[in-house]
Image (cartoon, helix red, strand yellow):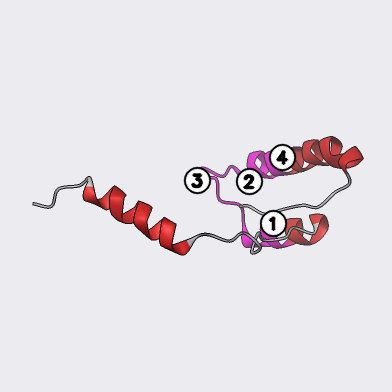
Amino acid sequence: MYGIVYVHKDNAESLRDEIKDVIYNDYIANDYSDDMPSDEFINNFGEKYNICIPNDIFFDEEELMKKMMDFMDDFELY
């Protein structure tokens, strides 16, 4: 689960601690073995904390593809 929560800097630490507690308590209460919260939890959590998906992050596609191809060149196919 990932996203961005916009908050005033004066409230950032307390909100971070609150969010960590909420997530931790949900994981403990539901005994998640694969670190997978329920869709219901994700939806409620997202609404409560106004989670924003970071769709404003841009990648240099050409550089990304070059790095991927360089990475793949390190493998030998048999």
At label 4, the amino acid type is Asn
Q: Secondary structure at mark 1?
A: helix
The circle on residue 34 is: 3
Marks 3/2: CA distance?
11 Å
Q: Residues within 10 Å of mark 1 (few under 14, many from 20)?
A: few
Say whether residue 5 is magenta: no
Q: Closer to the camera: disc 1 or disc 2?
A: 1
For the residues labelled 1 and 3, say whether their Cβ atoms are less than 8 Å apart. no
Specify which label sits upstream in the sequence, 1 or 3: 3
Give the magenta part as a residue range: 23-43
Q: Secondary structure at mark 3?
A: loop
The residue at which mark 1 appears reads as 41
The circle on residue 75 is: none
Residue 33 appears left or right of 5: left
Specify which label sits upstream in the sequence, 1 or 2: 2
Residue 10 appears left or right of 19: right
For the residues labelled 1 and 2, say whether their Cβ atoms are less than 8 Å apart. yes
The residue at which mark 2 appears reads as 30
Marks 1/2: CA distance?
11 Å
For the residues labelled 1 and 4, say whether their Cβ atoms are less than 8 Å apart. no
At label 1, the amino acid type is Phe
Marks 1/3: CA distance?
15 Å
Residue 14 appears left or right of 42: right
For the residues labelled 3 and 4, say whether their Cβ atoms are less than 8 Å apart. no
The residue at which mark 4 appears reads as 25
Q: Residue at x 59, y 42 (%)?
A: 31
Q: Nearer the viewer, residue 8 or 64?
A: 64
Say whether residue 26 is magenta: yes
